[in-house]
């Protein structure tokens, strides 16, 4: 092994300096300086490129003129004491901005294979919103001022590209709704088998309400592929003078794509023999996004 | 290093197939598809190579009230991994392998002592079927790769060869005691900058270390990187290194690594 058995450790002063630099940079929408130095070295070819892609994805990406530059990542650890639901939108939006800033520093046109991650560390009413991905350059294009962010695996990115569809970013929708049960519509103890209409409605997107659905904010011609749809219902106990209250909250996170309507896909579809062992990119894979795997962690609250 | 191989392991290696011993058997942990694709890539398996290291992790002292890298734990991860990988590589060298494919690095905690960790590296030693040289790592020893046989074929097919499995990790303590006490909970959500910057620092340290290993291995790039964080301690690992052999002489092979982390050393 050419690697050394000793990691290069940081001195306490270096650590303090670095933490201060990170906080200062993030507050001002910049990339922390050690990260910037690394990304610029990768951009200029002074350091090895780093890709989260599998070898098969690398092969495919290279054949479509995509060159990996560096692994990029971003985090926003948010305390959602005010609103859990809106915190999720805010946390992901902040992390997305930071990811784009890193991609720009790497001279990239796009970030592929973006994964949503959350450390399984539940401290108070807080959560970390982390994104990781691979910054790539498209051969023949100048570095972008606004790199696209693709939350699908590189294999799917290329598959979409061949069908003349470009993934452009992420749209996040988060909303909550209260049901104050004055007339006891949710109490159906003696009702037998019957739908709880009041709660069904709360669990859905109520029609006619200004729902912050991600698709409504998109420019013309853009569509979304929904990836994560996470909803919960809670009963919130109140004192006996008040009716029961129910809380429904919902998070929708989708990949936005740019495509022309009605354009048929001209890509040949061929039969292949899949030699992969176990789960494969063709027949399925492990979950791409790891956030929202479990419903068990959250506090109740809006 | 081959001198370190235990006697019975040397006996086992002697029984393997080689140019001097064509009636020997080969051993591998390949699945059928892996076996076929490694052969399709022009390589023949010779034998399983194993390296083990049981490691005692020293006591970590620290100021738990602030963010910091847990250096004793970080160093232990590096040292123990190095020993296990070097031993596996010594077996591969002894059997004359050009490289090791499908390396699995597992870390187990021994249940009777929380300070004991067992590192096991295992993979299949392979040689180029036509004796073509140039696949070895830049130090002349076998390449290491955690790629499966399928990925190994894909990698060679795309014009790269594996060189070395590289890793970067950082065991990091996020100080969280009392952090929520002063937070107003009304009006707006606030970012916990302390936690955010801890994540940034730990991740940066790990990526830098991985990149340093890749540079030392004279790699052109690293493929299959997995950046992940465990609870309490943040750790980043897993990559493989490759080299472009379009310009250079001969193709070789390269790799990545994975590992699991423990840690209840935080507060």
Image (cartoon, coloured by chain):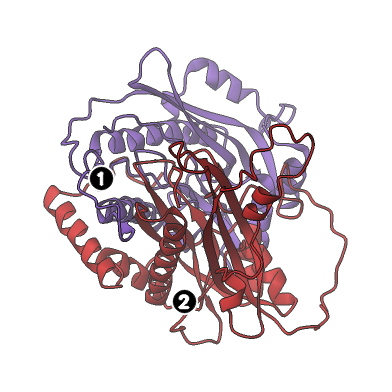
Residue shown at the point (56%, 71%) measured from the top left: A210
Q: Is residue B196 left or right of residue A74?
A: left
Helix, strand, or loop for circle 2?
loop
Residue furthest toward the top? B112
Q: Quadrant of the N terminus of chain A?
A: top left
Residue shown at the point (26%, 68%) measured from the top left: A27
> Can you identify the residue that label 2 sits on?
A108
Residue B147 pos. (x, y %): 60, 47
Residue furthest toward the left? A13
Total numbered labels placed on residues in the image? 2
Residue furthest toward the right? A271
Q: Mark 1 falls within which chain? A: B
User: Which chain is the one coloured red?
Assistant: A
Other residues around mark 2 within 10 Å, as few (<14) / some (14–19) / many (≥20) = many
Q: Mark 2 falls within which chain? A: A
Other residues around mark 1 within 10 Å, as few (<14) / some (14–19) / many (≥20) = some
Q: Is residue A282 left or right of residue A30?
A: right
Helix, strand, or loop for circle 1?
loop
Residue A206 pos. (x, y %): 64, 62
Decide: is A275 above or below B121.
Answer: below
Residue A131 pos. (x, y %): 46, 59
Distance from Cα at disc 2 to Cα at disc 1: 38 Å
> Can you identify the residue that label 1 sits on?
B180
């Amino acid at each position: 092994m050419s690697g050394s058995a000793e990691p290069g450790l940081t001195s306490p002063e270096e650590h303090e300096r670095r933490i201060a630099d990170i906080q200062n940079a993030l507050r001002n929408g910049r990339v922390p300086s050690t990260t910037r130095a690394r990304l610029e070295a990768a951009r200029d070819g002074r350091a090895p490129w780093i890709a989260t892609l599998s070898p098969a994805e690398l092969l495919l990406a290279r054949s479509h003129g995509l060159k990996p530059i560096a692994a990029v990542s971003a985090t926003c650890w948010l305390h959602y004491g005010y609103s859990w639901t809106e915190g999720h939108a805010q946390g992901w939006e902040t992390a997305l901005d930071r990811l784009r800033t890193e991609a720009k520093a790497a001279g990239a046109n796009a970030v592929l294979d973006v994964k949503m991650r959350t450390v399984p560390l539940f401290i108070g009413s807080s959560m970390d919103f982390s994104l990781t991905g691979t910054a790539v350059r498209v051969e023949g294009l100048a570095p972008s001022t606004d790199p696209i962010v693709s939350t699908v695996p590189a294999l799917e990115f290329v598959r979409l590209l061949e069908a003349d569809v470009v993934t452009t970013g992420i749209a996040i929708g988060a909303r909550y709704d209260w049901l104050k049960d004055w007339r006891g519509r949710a109490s159906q103890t003696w009702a037998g088998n019957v739908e709880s209409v009041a709660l069904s409605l709360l669990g859905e997107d109520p029609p006619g309400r200004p729902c912050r659905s991600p698709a409504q904010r998109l420019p013309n011609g853009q569509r979304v592929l929904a990836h994560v749809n996470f909803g919960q219902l809670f009963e919130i106990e109140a004192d006996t003078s008040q009716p029961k209250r129910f809380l429904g909250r919902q998070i929708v996170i989708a990949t936005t794509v740019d495509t022309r309507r009605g354009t048929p896909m001209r890509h040949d579809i061929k039969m292949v023999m899949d030699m992969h062992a176990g789960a494969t990119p063709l027949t399925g894979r492990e979950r791409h996004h790891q956030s929202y795997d479990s419903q068990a962690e959250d506090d109740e609250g809006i | 290093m081959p001198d370190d191989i235990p006697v019975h392991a040397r006996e086992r290696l002697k029984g393997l197939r080689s140019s001097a011993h064509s009636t020997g058997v080969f051993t591998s942990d390949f699945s059928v598809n892996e076996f076929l694709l490694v052969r399709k890539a022009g390589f023949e398996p010779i034998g399983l190579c194993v390296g083990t290291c049981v490691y005692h992790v020293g006591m970590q002292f620290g100021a738990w009230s602030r963010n910091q890298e847990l250096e004793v734990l970080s160093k232990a991860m590096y040292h123990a991994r190095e020993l296990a990988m070097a031993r596996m590589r010594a077996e591969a060298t002894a059997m004359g392998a050009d490289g090791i494919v499908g390396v699995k690095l597992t870390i187990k905690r021994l249940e009777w002592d929380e300070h004991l960790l067992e590192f096991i590296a295992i993979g299949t030693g392979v040689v180029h079927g036509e004796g073509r040289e140039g696949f070895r790592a830049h130090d002349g020893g076998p390449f290491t790769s955690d790629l499966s046989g399928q990925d190994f074929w894909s990698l060679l097919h795309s014009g790269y060869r594996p060189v070395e499995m590289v890793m970067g990790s950082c065991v990091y303590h996020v100080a969280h005691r009392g952090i929520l006490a002063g937070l107003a909970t009304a009006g707006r959500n606030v970012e916990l900058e302390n936690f955010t910057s801890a994540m940034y620092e730990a991740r940066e340290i790990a990526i830098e270390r991985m990149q340093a290993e890749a540079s030392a291995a004279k790699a052109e790039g690293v493929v299959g990187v997995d950046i992940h964080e465990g609870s309490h301690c943040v750790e980043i690992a897993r990559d493989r290194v490759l080299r472009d052999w379009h310009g250079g002489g001969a193709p070789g092979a390269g790799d990545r690594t994975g590992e699991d982390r423990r840690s209840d050393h935080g507060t």
